[in-house]
Amino acid sequence: MENFKKRLQRRKVGFMCMAIIVVITSIIDVFIILPKSQNGSSSNGMIAGVSSGTIISLGILSILKVIQLSKVLKDEKLIKLLYNKENDERLQSIRGKAGMPMILIMSIIMFIAGIIGSYFSEIIFYTLFAAGFAQLFVGVIVKFYYMKTM
């Protein structure tokens, strides 16, 4: 159980780092990138808005995860419940067959690449965001399929 506590603590630190990166990126985005993108093109403004919204939502989700992990780390009963949930063989099998860990990681990489690429080309932004959402949608469908059949 001590190893699991250490793993939870590392996750908490990782989410804190992500929240800090998001705050820095948001500050840069608001004070440097957004004023430059307001050159009259509504498409560039829309892309900048979606990028900013995605970055801010990632920050909010990481802060919520830090709060959740802080609460779990304070209570031994919650640690055991989370341990049992994460080590449930049925759920692990479903996630493995649906490819969820890799689909989620690859979709997040696509979104980040889309945000970075949006500063260079609109086509890159639209393509990577569409591919990321399509990938997540297919992953969710496959996961629900395996949840019903297993």
Image: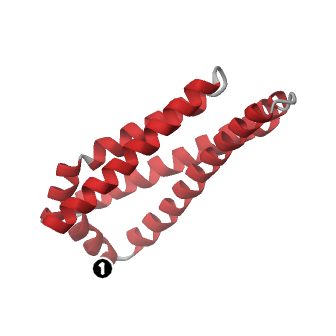
Q: Looking at this view, is 83 or 93 the one in front?
A: 93
Considering every residue shown, the one lying at the far bottom of the view is 77
* Residue 140, percent from left and from top: 33, 55
* Residue 131, percent from left and from top: 44, 36
Considering every residue shown, the one lying at the far right of the view is 40
| Image point (28%, 49%), residue name | 100
Considering every residue shown, the one lying at the far top of the view is 120
Asked if 54 appears above or below 90 in the picture, the reply is above
- Disc 1 residue crowd, few under 14, some 14–19, many 20+, Cα 10 Å: few
The number of numbered badges drawn on the structure is 1
Residue located beneath label 1 in the image: 77
**Quarter of the rendering occupied by the N terminus:** bottom left
* Residue 119, percent from left and from top: 67, 25
- Taking the image as shown, residue 8 lies to the left or right of residue 118, namely left
Quarter-of-image position of residue 141 = bottom left
Quarter-of-image position of residue 43 = top right
Asked if 69 appears above or below 78 in the picture, the reply is above
Asked if 76 appears above or below 59 in the picture, the reply is below
Q: Looking at this view, is 18 or 89 the one in front?
A: 89
| Image point (53%, 45%), residue name | 18
Can residue 2 be seen here? The reply is no
Asked if 15 appears above or below 147 in the picture, the reply is above
- Taking the image as shown, residue 149 lies to the left or right of residue 73, namely left
Q: Give, as a three-letter code, the residue at label 1.
A: Lys
| Image point (14%, 65%), residue name | 149
* Residue 71, percent from left and from top: 45, 72
